[in-house]
Image (spheres, rainbow, N blue to C red):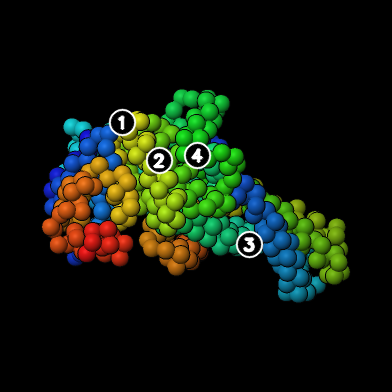
Amino acid sequence: MIEAKNVSKSFGDSKVLDDVSIKFETGKCNLVIGRSGSGKTVLMKCLVGLYEIDEGKVYFGDKVLSRMSFDEMKLVRQDIGMLFQGAALFDSLNVEENVMFPLAMFSQKSLEERRERANFCLSRVDLGNVNKLYPAELSGGMKKRVAIARAIAMNPQYLFCDEPNSGLDPHTANVIDNLILELTQEYNITTVVNTHDMNSVMEIGDRVSFIHNGKLCWEGDKDSILKSDNETLNEFVFATKLTRKLKGV
Amino acid sequence: MTFKKPERQSIYFRQILIEIEHLGIDSIGIVAFISVFMGAVLCIQMAFNLDTPLVPIYTIGYATRQSVVLEFSPTIISLILAGKVGSRIASEIGTMRVTEQIDALEIMGINSATYLIFPKIAACLFFNPILIMISIIVANIGGWLAGVVTGLVPSAEFIYGLKAFFEGYDIFYSLVKSVVFAFLIVSISGYHGYFTKGGALEVGEASTKGVVNSSIAIIIFNLLLTNLLLS
């Protein structure tokens, strides 16, 4: 389990996160939703320690992230897989090398074993015959899938996905969503997904936290989100014609 | 930005070899091209300025060699490398920063500064002195060619001048400068790339700052080192 307790973060005079407390449960897809610029990515980067928080604490199990030494942090991070908004694949490495990279850095596996694991992870995300291609030669959806393969290569306990289906067509977005859900349930990992896509919420939202202007505004699950009387949440959820039609507004 | 002990030394060794190829071997062509012309121009200018019966003609070869060894190869070539290598380093690392590749390294538990900058420093500290030696040799060949082809200095006189009053310390001085300049180029450009914030425009700015600041540092350290090592 991961828990953010009273987390605040500012950049200069601008307070991006204001006293946010959320629990992310193990074996579930924990979604953080909100409009662009609401503080979702900053929250995620605070959770994984890429940003230092100004106030509050982040717990990984019973350990406090901010109190960890460099070596402790290094160990925790080897249990973290992260899918970045732009995939963040290493341009100088091909697909196979990208997936094998964390294994080469931290595991004692031989080259053959690493290659086998990389192929397994790539097959898990339905990618075949792309091992020797470079990131520049891949489509957006393929990049995201390679990034997921790299994220799960080390069998992480925690999976963070920042806008996993932004810029993807609805079908590919669906494939990515379902993949994240399957991996979460299959390996019983704690998954945190940032999104502003209501389709994702309805597909995989075991737990949903709505952030607005850096504050936690609402928490619940995908079923209760449509019945909420929270005005700010409703403005976000029913912003499109399609969702308004579904609700009959 | 703090450096830590490398996670897996074999990977870092491989990275150093890759950087030697990208930052060093790929620069041989431009270094040789500039050096041959630099040596040729130096020889012609020496011949023009020493056109008097009071100075022996082999002085042209001697003065060309000394200028190349003491100043032109270590300093001018390092300034050229600050442009070529420095911009490459700053833009490569800067692009990795803005596309979150550095964050991806950190998330994996890898010290990104060590992984990205250390192999480049090691590669340049090892290979830049080799580039400078290549430059010294090629520039002197360029000088000899210019002298002989234009008829300003006979081949035997030029070669005698090249060998005259040779001191190994001059080469040592040149190599010390090349090592210090290599460190300045990589660390300054790497710093600007590593702390890039924003997008493509800022990557360009980081690249420019890397080149300009490392060139300024080279000029300042050139004076300091000359004063330290030659006075």
Mark 2 or mark 1, which is nearer to you? 2
Q: Earlier in the sequence, mark 2 or mark 1?
A: 2
What residue is pinned by disc 4? A126
Mark 3 or mark 2, which is nearer to you? 2
Are dots 2 and 1 on a single chain? yes
Find the distance from the CA under tag 2 to the CA under tag 4.
9 Å
At 80% from the left edge and 66% from the top edge, which residue is drawn?
B146
| Residue type pointed to by label 2 | Leu
| Residue type pointed to by label 1 | Asn
Q: Chain of mark 3?
A: B
Q: Secondary structure at mark 3?
A: helix
Are dots 2 and 4 on a single chain? yes
What residue is pinned by disc 1? A188
Q: Chain of mark 1?
A: A
Q: For the residue carrying disc 3, how many other residues have a C-alpha within 10 Å: few (<14), some (14-19), or many (20+)? A: many
What residue is pinned by disc 3? B72
Q: Chain of mark 2?
A: A
Q: Secondary structure at mark 1?
A: loop
Q: For the residue carrying disc 4, how many other residues have a C-alpha within 10 Å: few (<14), some (14-19), or many (20+)? A: some
Q: Which mark is residue A179?
A: 2
At 46% from the left edge and 32% from the top edge, which residue is drawn?
A103
Mark 4 or mark 3, which is nearer to you? 4
Q: Where in the figure is residue A100, as x and y percent of width and height? A: 50, 35
Find the distance from the CA under tag 3 to the CA under tag 2.
60 Å
Q: Nearer the viewer, residue A16 or A28?
A: A28
